[in-house]
Image (cartoon, rainbow, N blue to C red):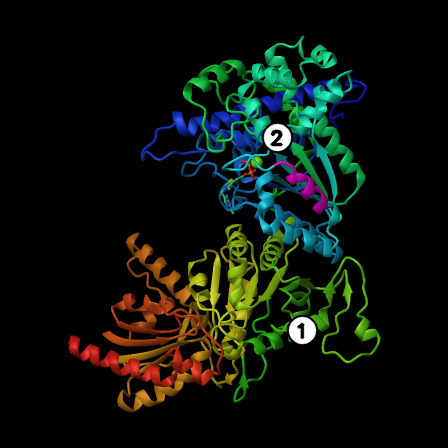
């Protein structure tokens, strides 16, 4: 237990180092508790809302975070801190001098530290955002896999050694199913270098968690190949157990229900004594242990759990680190609210100390009013000594010259991608996507360096989303080389999937949350591991919903990837209602940092695919989503305005100036729109036909232009405003998509035109396309009827 900066000769037992760490532990408890108090009771409150913050959840992990950040962590390690320990995390950074005091002072205020650690809002010190419980924990497993991937592909930076991905988890996070999905997937991929440290305070938000649950959970981890280390008792209790009568004391604590243990912790020494005496009062040896102790000493003994024993935690983590790279789960017994007046109380999750409680806590911490943020206030070390000590801590070393958010060079994207010659043929966007990717996979010429950076993944729908040919060329990633038995036995199969550490496809099980967490990790590889990847993931469009929280989580962290969801809508007709997506275009519009597109034709797809590879690398870019279809439709021969396709809409047939009507289509309904349009034009020769490639980009552009105008940029006009400008004010606009029509309804507000949005707003069902398009009112007849009605309404209105 010697810090690298303190020579063993100077500190042979490590006692000086431990004493310094205990000072830090004390400081972290004070700072996190005070920051929350300050936010709630000191800072002016303008709206009467409770500001909140979690003093009890924070207090629970103080010792663990001290051990981790000030002893065990190496700079190359990456940590997901449980959401409710956000204040402790900022206090840690304050001590390291990586944040000044403003974020802590402004905790939960605009511009201050976020409630829960946030990569995008709190800055470079946050390795993984957390907040939606369970996701940050699972994310570490996929980050570890990504680190492995970049190292095995020779893409890692030479100046940064591989580290560990560590989750500091609340025990209730293990109720989230996605944890177990991730465990299973991690096992399949032989994940290494992951630690999950569970703050086992046996409390969630509402209550005390059931007894014996963790016996089960421990077994689950072991079954998944994890090492499990339990930190149950600290050194005081361990010493007491070693004495005569100690066995009885241990049995009593082991058998004590979680809820009683919590209640006694809250009540304190006298309650502990009467409970112990009631059960074990006749045991003389036990009396010899407890009778000499004052109430406060007895309380200290009885709450001396492993997760609060700093020296023990450090020894345990260091021993585990020396063991190697096996994934390890630490179950650290703790008390929620440790060291604070509501320690152990079942209702303490959102509890805040009262100003009176804070004053007595302040006194016990020896903090003078006005000196709350002073580094050494209340410590027995001077500020200089404290700083000197912190400078010796391994995690104080910078990870890289640019800090913890690493930079990685951009990957050049050729001016155009090898699109299939589709003109005059019938082809689906899904097939077109597979062909383009397979061509990139040949890696010829300028495509070589691009192909090397593409990583594909799919939750067991690789073949059915047309990734197969790419995978045949680039192989499946596996830490170990495994042969394709079918290929070796020369058995005919379209899939030739050799597995090796050079493979570029990550084959996942069906769990869609894992899929999005992998995309999140791969999409942050440039900033986490300094190796830029271009992740491309395919999933059935309806099952985006199954992984939605993880998708939003990925976007919230600004992960960069290309999501290809296919097939989509009722156009996959015979598959029926559970596979026919309706709401996904709306998700695409509402998700921030995700540019959502739905091309109708392969020439548009080629433009958008290329755009995606570039956009996901741009500092001001984002992840990209392509919603595709298996419906084969005739492909036009034409020159396209790529910028318009990327901006979200282009005229297939431009309207005459002042035209009374236009038809707009999105995705595979192009043929129906074209048929209706040809008939419409017989009566309305000036009508226009508009291809919508992205209501999401159009809408975002429209809002941005409105904001810019409000800010005084008078000539800020969005693409959709320009596109609709030739139409008469109040012209009719009939739109159609294979998805919820609300995705288009807003178009009428852009220039006050009369929109009739057609789409699917009820669950689908099996059928063929003619029957289904008729039933759901999106066939050519329905479009024409809508045109007629819209024109009629327009005449009446005039
Ligand atoms: C997905 C999700 N559901 C619900 C919540 C609300 N919530 C916040 S903390 C919490 C319980 C946390 O308990 P635990 O993980 O044991 O953390 P502790 O505060 O005890 O350390 C819940 C239900 C959330 N943040 N995320
Ligand atoms: Mg808990």
Whether residue 127 is visible to the viewer of this picture, yes or no, is no
Up the image or down, 433 lies above or below 3; here it is: below
Q: Would you name the residue on which mark 2 appears? A: 257
Q: Give percent across and percent down for residue 593.
A: 48, 56
Between 782 and 26, the residue placed more toward the observer is 782
In the image as oriented, which residue stretches furthest toward the bottom? 682
Between 709 and 558, the residue placed more toward the observer is 558
Residue depicted at 35% across the width and 85% down the height = 781
Horizontally, residue 422 falls left or right of residue 467, namely: left
Q: Is residue 213 magenta?
A: yes
- Find residue 468 and name its label: 1
Q: Earlier in the sequence, mark 2 or mark 1?
A: 2
Q: Which residues are magenta?
A: 211-221
Up the image or down, 638 lies above or below 706; here it is: below
Horizontally, residue 602 falls left or right of residue 182, namely: left
Residue depicted at 58% across the width and 56% down the height = 513
Residue depicted at 36% across the width and 58% down the height = 704
- Displayed quadrant of residue 210: top right
- Find residue 112 and name its label: none
Up the image or down, 107 lies above or below 691; here it is: above
Q: Nearer the viewer, mark 2 or mark 1?
A: 2
- Kindly check if marks 2 and 1 are in contact, taking CB atoms under 8 A apart as contact: no
Q: How many marks?
A: 2
Q: Secondary structure at mark 1?
A: helix
Q: Give percent across and percent down for residue 124.
A: 56, 42
In the image as oriented, which residue stretches furthest toward the top? 292
Q: Give percent across and percent down for residue 143.
A: 65, 50
Instruction: Give the spatial CA distance, label 2 vs label 1.
Output: 54 Å
Whether residue 491 is visible to the viewer of this picture, yes or no, is yes
Between 255 and 731, the residue placed more toward the observer is 255
Q: Secondary structure at mark 2?
A: loop
């Amino acid at each position: 237990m010697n810090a690298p900066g303190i020579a063993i000769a100077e500190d042979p037992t490590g006692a000086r180092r431990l004493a310094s760490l205990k000072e830090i532990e004390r400081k972290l408890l004070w700072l996190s508790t005070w920051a929350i108090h300050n936010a709630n009771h000191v800072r002016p409150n303008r709206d009467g809302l409770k500001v909140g913050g979690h003093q009890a959840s924070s207090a629970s992990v103080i010792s663990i975070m001290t051990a981790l950040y000030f002893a065990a962590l190496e700079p190359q390690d990456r940590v997901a801190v449980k959401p409710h320990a956000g204040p402790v995390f900022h206090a840690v950074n304050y001590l390291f001098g990586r944040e000044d005091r403003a974020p802590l002072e402004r905790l939960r205020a605009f511009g201050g530290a976020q409630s829960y650690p946030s990569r995008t809002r709190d800055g470079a010190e946050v390795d993984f955002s957390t907040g939606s419980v369970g996701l940050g924990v699972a994310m570490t497993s996929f980050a570890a896999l990504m680190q492995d991937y970049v190292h095995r592909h020779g893409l890692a930076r030479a100046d940064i050694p591989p580290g560990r991905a560590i989750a500091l988890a609340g025990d209730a996070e293990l109720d989230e199913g996605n944890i177990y999905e991730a465990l299973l997937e991690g096992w399949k991929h032989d994940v290494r270098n992951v630690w999950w440290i569970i703050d086992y305070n046996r409390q969630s938000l509402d209550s005390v968690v059931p007894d014996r649950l963790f016996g089960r959970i421990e077994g689950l981890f072991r079954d998944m190949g994890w090492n499990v280390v339990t930190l149950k008792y600290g050194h005081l209790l361990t010493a007491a157990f070693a004495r005569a009568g100690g066995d009885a004391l241990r049995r009593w604590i082991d058998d004590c229900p979680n809820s009683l243990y919590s209640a006694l912790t809250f009540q304190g020494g006298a309650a502990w004594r009467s409970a112990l005496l009631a059960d074990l009062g006749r045991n003389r040896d036990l009396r010899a242990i407890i009778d000499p102790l004052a109430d406060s000493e007895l309380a200290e003994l009885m709450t001396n759990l492993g997760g609060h024993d700093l020296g023990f935690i450090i020894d345990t983590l260091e021993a585990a680190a020396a063991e190697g790279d096996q994934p390890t789960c630490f179950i650290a017994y703790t008390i929620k609210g440790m060291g604070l007046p509501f320690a152990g109380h079942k209702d303490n999750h959102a509890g805040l100390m009262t100003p009176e409680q804070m004053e007595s806590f302040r006194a016990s911490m020896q903090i003078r009013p006005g000196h709350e943020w002073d580094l050494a206030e209340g410590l027995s070390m001077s500020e200089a000594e404290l700083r000197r000590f912190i400078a010796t801590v391994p995690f104080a070393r910078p990870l890289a010259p640019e800090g913890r958010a690493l930079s990685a060079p951009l990957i050049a994207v050729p001016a155009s991608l090898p699109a299939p010659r589709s003109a005059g043929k019938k082809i689906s966007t899904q097939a077109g996507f597979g062909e383009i990717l397979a061509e990139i996979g040949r890696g010829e010429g300028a495509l070589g360096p691009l192909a090397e950076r593409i990583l594909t993944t799919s939750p067991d729908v690789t073949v059915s989303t047309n990734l197969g040919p790419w995978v045949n060329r680039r192989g499946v990633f596996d830490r170990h080389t495994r042969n394709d038995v079918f290929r070796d036995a020369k058995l005919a199969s379209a899939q030739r999937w050799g597995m090796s550490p050079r493979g570029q496809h990550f084959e996942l099980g069906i769990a869609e949350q894992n899929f999005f967490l992998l995309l999140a990790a791969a999409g942050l590889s440039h900033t986490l591991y300094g190796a830029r990847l271009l992740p491309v993931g395919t999933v059935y469009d309806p099952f985006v919903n199954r992984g939605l929280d993880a998708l939003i989580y990925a976007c919230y962290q600004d992960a960069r990837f290309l999501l290809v969801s296919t097939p989509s809508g009722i156009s996959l007709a015979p598959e029926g209602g559970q596979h026919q997506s309706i709401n996904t275009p709306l998700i695409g519009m509402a998700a921030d940092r995700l540019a959502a597109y739905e091309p109708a034709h392969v020439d548009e797809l080629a433009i958008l695919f290329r755009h995606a590879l570039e956009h996901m690398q741009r500092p001001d870019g984002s992840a990209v989503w392509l919603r595709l279809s298996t419906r084969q439709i005739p492909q036009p021969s034409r020159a396209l305005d790529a910028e318009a396709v990327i901006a979200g809409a282009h005229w297939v047939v431009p309207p005459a100036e002042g035209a009374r009507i236009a038809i707009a289509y999105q995705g595979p309904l192009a043929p129906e729109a074209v048929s209706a349009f040809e008939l419409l034009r017989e009566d309305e020769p000036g009508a226009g036909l508009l291809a919508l490639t992205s209501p999401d980009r159009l809408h975002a552009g429209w809002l941005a232009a409105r904001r810019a105008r409000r800010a005084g940029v008078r000539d800020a006009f969005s693409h959709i405003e320009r596109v609709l400008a030739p139409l008469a004010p109040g012209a009719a606009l009939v739109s159609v998509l294979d998805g919820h029509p609300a995705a288009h309804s807003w178009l009428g507000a852009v220039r006050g035109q009369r929109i009739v949005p057609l789409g699917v707003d009820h669950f689908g069902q099996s059928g063929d396309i003619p029957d289904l398009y008729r039933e759901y009112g999106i066939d050519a007849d329905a479009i024409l009827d809508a045109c007629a009605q819209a024109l009629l309404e327009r005449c009446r209105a005039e």
